[in-house]
Amino acid sequence: MSDARTRLDKINTRIRNNPVLSLLIAVSTLVIGLSTFTNATRNLMDLFSGAEQRPAINGLWQAQVSYDWPNADYQESFNFAGSDTQLYGSASFTGSMNGILEGAIAGDTLRFITKTPESLGSGPAQEAIHRYQGKIVGDEIEFVMQTEGGYSAHVPIEFTAKRNSNPPPTQPAPN
């Protein structure tokens, strides 16, 4: 006589006849269900509570920067944009605007780089990379900027950028 039961029927019968295995499967299912529900609830609560909200840094910032060579005091501008952890916009270096690259913001810390050509006499230009790291403190950002590459070595520069409180001028409405 042949056994007409399928493999699934045999497994089902074995589970029913073994209370420890049945209990283990039930507890495992409950743990997985609770874990999934807990993670989904946490994600919803973070969404509604605004946990880890991006600081309101978008807009124009200015800083007086003293570089590490003689007579090198510049009024620099930073125009930040982005959302979530993304940061883009522009930053000036010795008064010349450059695009922000590899910008990121996490909590109250932001990081980005800019690149500028550096030339010496009639020789070819070399690329200087400026790495910025800033800590947001109210309406100020405390920066450290390190330059690498180019024709000369530089020490890290520390400066504080302040939010530009003067809105840009508006164009009069046409008549």
Image (spheres, rainbow, N blue to C red):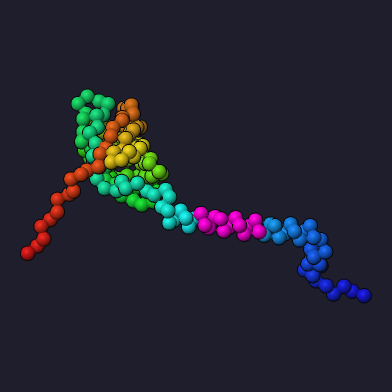
- Left or right? Give the position of 37 relative to 80: right
Could you tell me which residue is drawn at 83 percent across and 72 percent down? Answer: 5
Is 151 inside the magenta-drawn segment?
Answer: no
The residue positioned 79% from the left and 63% from the top of the image is 15
Q: Is 173 left or right of 110, judged from the image as shown?
A: left
Whether the magenta-drawn stretch holds residue 40 is answered as yes
Q: Quadrant of the C terminus?
A: bottom left
Q: Name the residue: 24% across, 36% down.
A: 63
Q: Which residues are magenta?
A: 30-42
One can see residue 124 in this view = no
Given residues 122 and 160, the one toward you in this image is 160
Name, please, the residue furthest toward the right: 1
Snapshot quadrant of residue 130? top left
Residue at the image position 43 percent from the left and 56 percent from the top? 48
Q: Quadrant of residue 24?
A: bottom right
Looking at the magenta stretch, what is its main secondary structure? helix
State the image coordinates of residue 58 (x, y, percent, origin top left). Answer: 29, 48
Q: In screen coordinates, is 1 left or right of 140? A: right
Kindly indicate the quadrant of the structure image that contains residue 76. Answer: top left
